[in-house]
Image (cartoon, coloured by chain):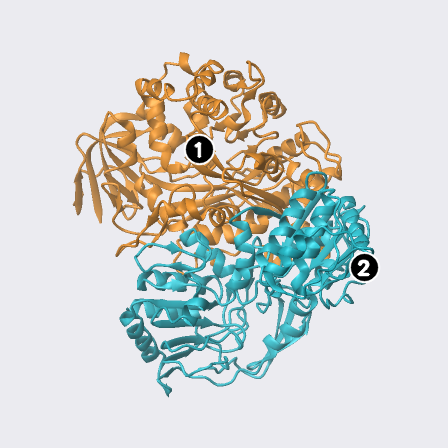
Amino acid sequence: MTAQGEGSATELFQNVTCPFCGLLCDDLEIARTGTTLKVVKNGCPRANAGFQRVLPPAKPLVGGREVGLRDAIEAAAALIRDAQLPLFGGMATDVDGARAVMSLADRACGVVDHALSEAQYRNLKVLQTSGWITSTLTETRNRADLILIVGSDVDKLHGRFFERVVCAPQSMFKDVAKRTVVFIGEGLDTSAASGGRVGEVINLECPSGRLTDVLGVLQARLRGAPLAASEPTSPKRGILATLLSRSRNVVGKSPEIAGVKLAQIDLVAEKCKAARYGVMVWAPPSLTLPQADLAVHLMCEIIKDLNVTTRFAGLSLGGNEGSPSAASVATWQTGYPLRVSYANGRPDYDSYRYSIGRMVAENEGDLLVWTASFSTDIGPPVTRMPTIVLGTPGIRLSQPPEVFIPVGTPGIDHAGSLVRCDNVVSLPLKNLHRSRLPRAADVLAAVERAL
Amino acid sequence: MMIKLTGGKVYDPTNGVDGEVRDIYVSDGRIVAPAPEARIDEEYNLKGRVVMAGAIDPHTHIGGGKVTIARMLMPEDHARDEVAHTDLTRAGTGHALPSTMITGYRYAEMGYTACFEPAMLPANARQAHLEMGDTPLVDKGAFVMLGSDDFMLRLIAEKSDPSLIKDYIAWTMHAAQAIAVKVVNPGGISAFKFNQRKLDLDEKHAYYGITPRDILVTLARGLLELGVTHPLHVHGCNLGIPGNVETTLATIRAAEGLPLHLTHIQFHSYGIGGDRHFDSGAARIAELLKQNPNISIDVGQVLFGQTCTASGDSMRQYNGAKNADPKRWVVMDIECDAGCGVVPFRYRDKSFVHSLQWAIGLETFLLCEDPWRIFLTTDHPNGAPFYTYPHLIRLLMDRGFRKDMMQKVQPDALKNSTLPSLEREYSLYEVAIMTRAGPARSLGLKDLGHLGAGACADITVYVDNADREAMFARPELVFKNGELIVRDGKVTKVVQGATHVARPAYDPAAIEKPLKDYFDRYHTMRMENFKLSDEEIVEGGRGKIVVQPTKARAS
């Protein structure tokens, strides 16, 4: 059933949306010959790997044995019917797939969560406690005269962010100054910030774990606090050490914070105040420090402070594997951004309790239903629970699932839509006719009917 | 199959029927001419019942990114109203920001069969339609926002050919699948991105050098000449600012006879009189409306309790964020196209300001004499959630009840409003105009909002109860396209409504050439992908598209 795009003639697709990262670039040109895709124009390493991956043959499996799709659906339905608390994880699919997961979970009284929601929750915790001011890709591309990239190796995560946003050659506005690009973090690759639109590039090199120190001092300086700090003498890491160091207003001889000279932070603070439209960019998946939500919170508060006199906004990237789509669909259907349990028939929300990653690790729940239709490395976690996997052929499996159903990739094997990382724009996905693999949405709907 | 609704008291203002006892015949989802000889397959005895067309909400924020941001922002609000699934219906949450399915169920359970999302950003149109696609039972449609988007502002600033401007308006309506066009704080959302903090009707945008007046007139004339039925839907300048009644009066005059719909006018009717420099401007607006039949309004009534405001007006929402309750809020600058602001809000009856807002809304309803030009809205969820409509209807229909409620609000507020002196009570006929016939006529919904032969059989049947709140909260029967979907205020069948659009004529070659170049040069999305196809809306059994007629394009 993984066969086949038909014939040996080459078909060229234009304005193709790439589903392999949260930017959803939609200007790709893809050529298909039979089942082989080639990125002809506007690729990036991730897009090339995703589109050009050779699809291994895959058949539905029940207990490791090849079966027909119908039998696999029946077997999945039987497992879900018997489960007390099925966990619907992964959710790496498009809007229709997310809708189908929600519908099935509602019917089956299960829990829903996305494989990458831990990263999303670094933002959502801030949204749900204090809110923010944010921008979007086109707004930033045209308007920003200052871009701060915080704690995130954006070029590695989103291969075309610099080309399409930071270094885009033209602005729709005539008098936008050359933009200053500031990097704050550990070992960030600054080389992509180049070209005619980019003026000064400043790099505040600091250890990832000390990001909040630098942000905290930046906030303090912007607020006019007479603060200087020295390196903490304690080598301890972690939240406590960070908080301790932040509370210590020691003036050193050559004031430095986490290896960054205070004078440099002051320079950045001045640039922020002078900017007409500054944008602070982060990618939640990169913020792996233990208090990542605190870093996001600090950024959002700095942005709010700056808006008293000028315009400033945040721009959160990430959003791979359909995670913004899953969070959006879950929110519009239940009010809650994932981590919802339908166990009592009603949507019950608890962002800690219903994290499927945590539930699997602590063996809560008795069945894991995992959907992953984009990349092969979003396999289900190791678990003692029986698993049902709706996966792209070749998906990494840490253990043999009870039921495996190969599904198509949205935007390659079937049409669909996805929500972009900025949570505003949604893009249509084309059917490139690579294979006849079924849509996850259709398989899930069939399972629901079979309950 | 022929269905007969026998002996109900029918209120059908489109056809001039005011409480007469009539039989209604339904076949194949439509109302048909009386056919006493026909074989009746199903009959409902409606003796003593009140029969109206399904109600239409012409301004309710039910779909699109800002509503979902508001939902994300307010988990504790949903927790008070978690709704379990049934064999028929999906689980979800209600209260101030109901989830999509619950929105559909509860509107239908209240006798509504069509709802219009008034603030669809072009950049967010796909998601708005995806959300509306998950809103069952009711018909839907959306107004696309223009007037702070760079392309329109530069067309106006460059004094472009009016024909090209009209092509762009029409193209946007097609691309975003809209039935009407809305302007929000004309130019102001854009001006805020250039760090302007207010923009009066005749104040120049710092970058484009044009004024809100220029934008309003260009859009209003463009829509008129394109033959779009619904006039420009205007969320004016200076929302929420004491003294903004002057802006609103000036906006009405600025129309110079062009049709405009001024939305949630309550938020734009504030004077600066009285001890606290905040009083009602409703009477002055009502007076000017009498002289300007080209203007229609909806109210945006405030009712007390927790809600969350969600608006495209990022400039004014940023300003209002200091009053956020609870203290968290979102402002977004979007795609050089639009913006949004989401600010939770709790209206308190002990507050002078909130009580005066409440009074101004009611005054507006009671002072506007022509029910064809005023629509019943709370600007859901901004003034109050939509499920407060039955309470609002009782406030309008029942003077004694209204006076009781006035006892509960902050007393000084009433001294700054004419409300205590107003004795008017709305009739059922007027309510039917304001919630059915009027919105249908204004939006150009050919077959909705009435009960004449050929209409869609969207019918609501109420028990005639002197407690109008109880009556309108819980219709006895609701039919959607002739199918019974609600009985005794509970959903009995789930169907999918249609999506209504309008498609004025335009020259694709003239507009897509410059637009294609513009998108390629500046945007992060291709023009081809910006356009939303019919299939994207209807796939998966999500209803159908109904293209409402437009008049011939004038030039």
Answer with left or right where residue B35 lies relative to residue B408. Answer: left
- How crowded pointer 1 is (Cα within 10 Å; few <14, some 14-19, many 20+) is rated as many
The picture places residue B236, in percent across and down from the top left corner, at: 59, 31
Give the quarter of the figure containing the C terminus of chain B. top right
Q: Which of A228/A295 is in front?
A: A228
Circles 2 and 1 on the same chain? no
Q: CA distance from mark 2 to mark 1?
A: 50 Å
Q: Which of A125/A371 is in front?
A: A125
Q: Is residue B215 above or below residue B71?
A: above
Chain A's colour?
cyan
Residue located 41% across and 22% down the image: B409
For residue B391, what is the image quadrant? top left
Q: Is residue B304 above or below residue B535?
A: above
The picture places residue B161, in percent across and down from the top left corner, at: 71, 40
State the residue position of label 2: A201
State the residue position of label 1: B378
Q: Which amino acid does the dot numbered 1 rest on?
A: Thr
Parent chain of label 2: A
Q: Which amino acid does the dot numbered 2 rest on?
A: Val
- Label the orange chain with its letter: B
Secondary-structure class at tag 1: loop
- Residue B550 visible, this angle: yes
Answer with left or right where residue A438 lies relative to residue A125. Answer: left
